[in-house]
Amino acid sequence: MSNKINNDFGPGQRKIVLVGNPNSGKSVLFHRLTGQYVDVSNFPGTTMEFCCSKWGQDFLVDTPGVYGLSYNTPEESLVRDAVLTADMVINVVDAVHIDRDLFLTCQIADMGVPMLVVLNMADELLSRGLELNPAVLEDRLGVPVIPTVATTGEGIDLLKERMSHARPGQESHLVKKLLPQYSGLPRGEALMVLEGDPEVAARNNMAPGGEKGNIYADRRRRANDITSTALREKTADVAFATRLGHWLIRPATGIPALLLALWLFYELVGVFFAQTVVGYTEGVFMNGYYEPWIRSLLVRVIDLQSPLGVMLAGQFGLLTMAITYVLGLLFPLVLGFYLVLSTLEDSGYMSRIAILMDRVMGCLGLNGQAVVPMVLGFGCVTMALITTRLLTSERERRIATFLLALTVPCSAQLAFVAAILGSLGPGYMLLYGLIIFSLMAGVGTVLNRFMPGGSVPLLLDLPPMRVPRIDNVLLKSWTRTVSFIKEAFPVFLGGAFLLSLLSITGLIDKIQKLMEPLTMGWLYLPNETASAFIMGFIRRDFGTAGIMEITMDPLQTFVALVTLTMFVPCIASTLVIFKERGWREGTVIWLMITVLAFVGGGLLSRLFNFTHDLNPAMTLPLTALVMVAALFIVVTISRRRQTIG
């Protein structure tokens, strides 16, 4: 189970807290010890709340990865308080990065809490030509040190045996000298006050101390000294995984590898899962077997043409469309994405992708992590919107969500787009690509300029490259998928209920009639195109396919195609936006995209008329020139204002 930590323990029950740096293997160790699953990955920031479980007679707590215990971040504050109230701490140290991790170890030792040190990933030291002496660590730290390989379970039995040997670690000479001035406080609380922690000082009615800089510098020197004593280089040979990790972040070798990885990512998620698997689960199983079966059951008890029948089994029925979308469309998409993402995370490659793409995505107000949802959008926008969870800040999630919904056509729509553009000619195809790129660059630049806040710097700890464990990938993917479906199911039921009401009351037909002046008077398109936009909201590819059935000249067809691309995404994507961003913000995004789509389509139609009047043969080149000039002006003005601001 995963829940926030509490302090309600039974008689004789100890609170044992797992503490360590990000990617040190705490969550894997928690799973090994308790049999309970935690979100285990090689990508920083995935464990965002405490996970607790009974462990024999005791209570084991897995905490978020932190580099120190202080008031700097909410995570550090929570972990600090967990350690201060713990009966025992198991400090998980990444053997490969022991020089970094020992800073936290020394801080816990200074706090005087009984502790054990788990030296995890000990097997990877040999592959890097290094050797670590646990006995030296035990002597210098004053606590038991147990080498483990949590992914295989090696050392877990020894850890259980030595639990009774936990004891407070050796405090530094400086801390030992300074602590007596707070003799009335417990040692851990006194250390936090000494280090200037305002939260701990306030609850003890004291002024924060001013020794943080001196203590931290001394602690860093101590950690370095212990590392140099216990760690030695065994051989000059460097493992292939280490060399590969370096190659993947160098532009000359990393960019070609990234392009290959993104292509494979797209083929697996955007083509195989979004088209092949969903084609079977949604098209064959749900539409071919499930929906006829559920209608055959309902027809025995109710009239399917009645309001209740339409509500349950109509085009937008609670038991037809809602269930089909959740199980036939959403479930395989989410599972496929998490299988691929978990593989990338556990291999250590995800962090390297983010580093390579950071500068490019920074132009759009995003950081390198955003490359994953942007690429996935061309496979399935619904899936890409889900993956915006990867992004660090709410600001970046908003920008990515807006860009995906406005500018990225999904693979199902792209098939019809390609068919239409192929019939129009290569000039229209090039102009379509230019418009999509210009929209993404221009809108992203404007959002980055005017949206409050700034881009979050990409601060990542590069994990070692390794072969992912299949059992961990499968378990994590399944757990994440089930969790998401549980959250999404009520949202899809609500969306189906609303659409059914609109259908029963005839409001859908009235909306189509209301759109006719907009399509005819503003977009200069035939009145039949209103139905294409309605169908495009239900499914983008349906709307695009509808354009092919309407008689229009090439310029009108192109305007309809671009407008439909910018138009609000399909109902599944819209419901995911509402789920991820909330109903209020989701509605704002939905309305803004709708307005921008029709404003953009109308301006494009007028631009076509203007350039066509100037020179019919030069309509497309002149339109392209205007688009490039407009993009240059927007980007230049936005960046100049950003620099001045």
Image: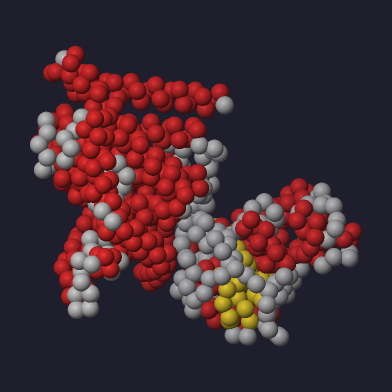
Query: Residue 403 location, x and y as percent?
Result: 37, 41
- Name the image quarter holding residue 116: bottom right
**Residue ID at (80%, 60%):** 203
The answer to whether one can see residue 195 in this image is: yes
Query: Which of the image's four quarters has the C terminus?
Result: top right
- Horizontally, residue 587 falls left or right of residue 107, namely left
Query: Residue 279 location, x and y as percent?
Result: 19, 61
Closer to the camera, 426 or 574? 574
The answer to whether one can see residue 429 in this image is: no
- Name the image quarter holding residue 59: bottom right
Q: Is residue 526 above or below residue 542?
A: above
**Residue ID at (73%, 51%):** 216
Query: Residue 522 location, x and y as percent?
Result: 26, 30
**Residue ID at (23%, 42%):** 513
Q: Is residue 634 above or below residue 411?
A: above
- Name the image quarter holding residue 563: top left
